């Protein structure tokens, strides 16, 4: 599971991540959460029993360099997700964010396994 969400901030998107992890875990799924940024507080994930991967410097997990001010590049996130999946193939891959989903679909590694949640769809047609 991955979303363009900073789990160190409590907002609607972070609560969505927490809720999805809890729902999947309660449904019997083993959940791997790849964090966008190193998780510095366990406020949201303390109740969640997941295998968490996060990147700090050269570590494995979220896209390098992402923090509150800098959004992770979808290409970086896609590469990290592919590497995590190579270590242990996942049955489903839950993603949040249209830019990320566009990149992952283009990379074609997770065909038939994507569950997507798109919140950043343009709401008006430009003329």
Image (cartoon, rainbow, N blue to C red):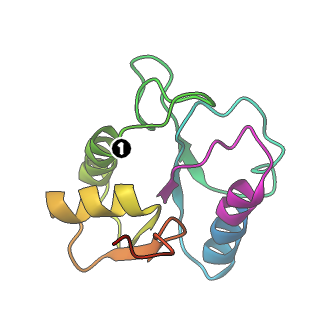
The x, y position of residue 45, in whole percent, is 75, 50
- Where on the picture, by quarter, is residue 68? top right
* Relative image position of residue 116 (x, y in whole percent): 43, 73
Q: Is residue 47 left or right of residue 19?
A: right
Locate residue 54, reporting x and y percent.
52, 35
Say whether residue 2 is magenta.
yes
How many numbered marks, from 0 up? Answer: 1
Report the quarter where the C terminus lies. Answer: bottom left
Q: Report which quarter residue 41 is drawn in.
A: top right
**38 left or right of 11?**
left
58 is higher (above) or lower (below) than 94 = above
**Residue at 37% in and 70% down:** 126
Q: Position of residue 107 (x, y in %)?
A: 16, 57
Q: Residue furthest front?
A: 127
At x 84% / y 44%, what residue is drawn? 43
Name the residue at the top extreme: 57
Magenta residue check for 32: no
Identify residue for label 1: 77
In the rendered image, which quarter is residue 16 located in? Answer: bottom right
In the image, residue 105 sits, relative to residue 82, either above or below, namely below
The residue located at (51%, 75%) in the rendering is 123
Against 115, residue 93 (above or below) is above
Out of 66 and 25, give the one closest to the viewer: 66
* Secondary structure type for disc 1: helix
Query: Depth check: 91 or 104 in front?
Result: 104
Drawn side of residue 97 relative to residue 43, left or right: left
Q: Which residues are magenta?
A: 1-17
Answer above or below: position of 112 versus 102. Answer: below
Q: Residue at x 60, y 75 (%)?
A: 24
């Amino acid at each position: 599971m991955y979303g363009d969400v900073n789990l160190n901030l409590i907002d609607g998107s972070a609560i969505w991540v927490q809720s999805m992890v809890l729902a999947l875990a309660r449904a019997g799924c083993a959940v791997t959460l790849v964090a966008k940024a190193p998780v510095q507080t366990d406020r949201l994930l303390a109740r969640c029993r997941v295998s968490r991967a996060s990147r700090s410097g050269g570590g494995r997990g979220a896209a390098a360099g992402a923090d509150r001010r800098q959004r992770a590049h979808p290409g970086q996130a896609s590469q990290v997700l592919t590497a995590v999946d190579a270590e242990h193939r996942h049955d489903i891959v839950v993603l949040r964010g249209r830019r990320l989903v566009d990149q992952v679909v283009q990379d074609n590694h997770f065909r038939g396994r994507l569950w997507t949640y798109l919140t950043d769809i343009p709401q008006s047609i430009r003329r």
